[in-house]
Image: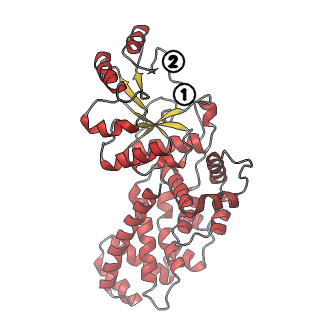
Amino acid sequence: MLFRDGPDNCFPDVEDEQATNRLLADNFFTSNANHLTSGKKAFVNFPHNSLVQRIPLMFSKQSFVIEILESCKPDDELLEAVIELHQKGYTLALDDFVPHTAWNRFLPYIHIIKFDIRATPIAKASFFIRHQKTKYSKMQFLAEKVENHEEFIAAREAGFDLFQGFFFSRPEMIQNKALTPSALTTLRLFQEISQEDVNFKQVESIIATDVSLSYKLLRHVNNMTSSRSKPITSFKQALVYLGEERLRRFITFIATSHAMEKKPAALYSLSLQRAHLCERLGKLVTPRIAGNQAFLTGLFSLLDSILDKPIEELIEQLPLSEEIKLALVNQEGTLGQILRLMEAYDAAEWDKVSQFCQELVINESNVADLYLESVKWATLFEKQQQQSY
């Protein structure tokens, strides 16, 4: 099962990670993959980061064969992920395999090895197959790009167990209309899950307003609980079943694969950074600003750039206080001054930084320290989110 972002049957100009996330989200969250594959396991490509982040663990081990891309680096991180996935019952395959000693320690945990017979001659693959079958009797070998009867016979006699190529079937294009979660809803959820204690009731109310997220959440949880006698039919049941960490992983995964599509990753990072910096600066002014209000102001300060819509139109769709709305739309009030200060600092307009610091009665050196702290916080937050899934 390969990702194509259109009917031209060519790989789109996207990163491997995004392609894998989109394929999984569109086919294993929102549509019946069993129907597409006639109840059999699909082979799905997984690049290095997706494996290290344990993305396959979000899905049932019956869903697919984990195909480790040839571009993966055979390092310790990858080995740890492979061992864990193997122990938990997932089927693992090495794609476009080229024998190398660096992969030897991975072989005890691999179920299928795929050879591209255009890149590795059948005779060369045969020598490797005979040697490995004496060590790993249950390991299977798959010949890719088998294009005629002669190649099929030669591959079978060489010891291959499985076969793939135009000789058997041409690729079939399956078109699905992706249910893309509202980026606005996703950002509201990010605000909720970034709290120390997740407010499940609030998360439930947000998810209930987005048909795409609602559908994906219920499908995802019921796929995970297929052995239960009764399906999970309410958001509350689903959220309680997932728990805080898996809920964070689910929302972060969906957001990564859809909400920031075609936008630079730095835009998302800057939103997080501004949220934290605004919250910290809000504690220095008099009177102090509630942390949640300041956090939201910073988080949504780039909403118009992210969603390509006027900020006035977007703000009306969020249940925000008048102080936040005035800050975001007109840069008025104390929150508005803090936003102007952050923008001036981003642009290295030091005269304006001094001016705004005087107006807010904030020490400039404190702003410098908090700015660096916010950059570190945003980086750590993203890393923790990645590690959680």
The residue wearing badge 1 is 173
How many marks do you count on the picture? 2
Task: Examine the rendering and report whether any part of residue 349 can be seen.
Answer: yes
Instruction: Please give the name of the residue rendered at 66% of the width and 48% of the height, measured from the top-left corner.
Output: 222
Q: Residue drawn 39% across and 70% down?
A: 377
Residue kind at label 2, given as amino acid type: Ser
Residue shown at 43% from the left, 80% from the top = 280
Determine which residue is flagged by label 2: 169
Q: Nearer the viewer, residue 109 or 36?
A: 109
Q: Nearer the viewer, residue 227 or 334?
A: 227
Q: CA distance from mark 2 to mark 1?
A: 12 Å
Q: Residues within 10 Å of mark 2 (few under 14, many from 20)?
A: few
User: Residue 42 or 358: which is nearer the viewer?
Assistant: 42
Picture coordinates of residue 154, whole percent (x, y)? 37, 11
Residue 316 against residue 96 in the figure, above or below: below
Q: Is residue 108 left or right of residue 214?
A: left
Q: Please name the amino acid that badge 1 sits on.
A: Met
Query: Residue 107, position in %: x, y?
Result: 35, 36
- Please tell me in which quadrant of the rendered image residue 62 appears: top right
Is 234 placed left or right of 224 in the picture? Answer: right
- Binning the other alpha carbons within 10 Å of mark 1 as few (below 14), some (14 to 19) or many (20 upward) gives few
Q: Secondary structure at mark 1?
A: loop
Q: Is residue 385 above or below residue 349?
A: above
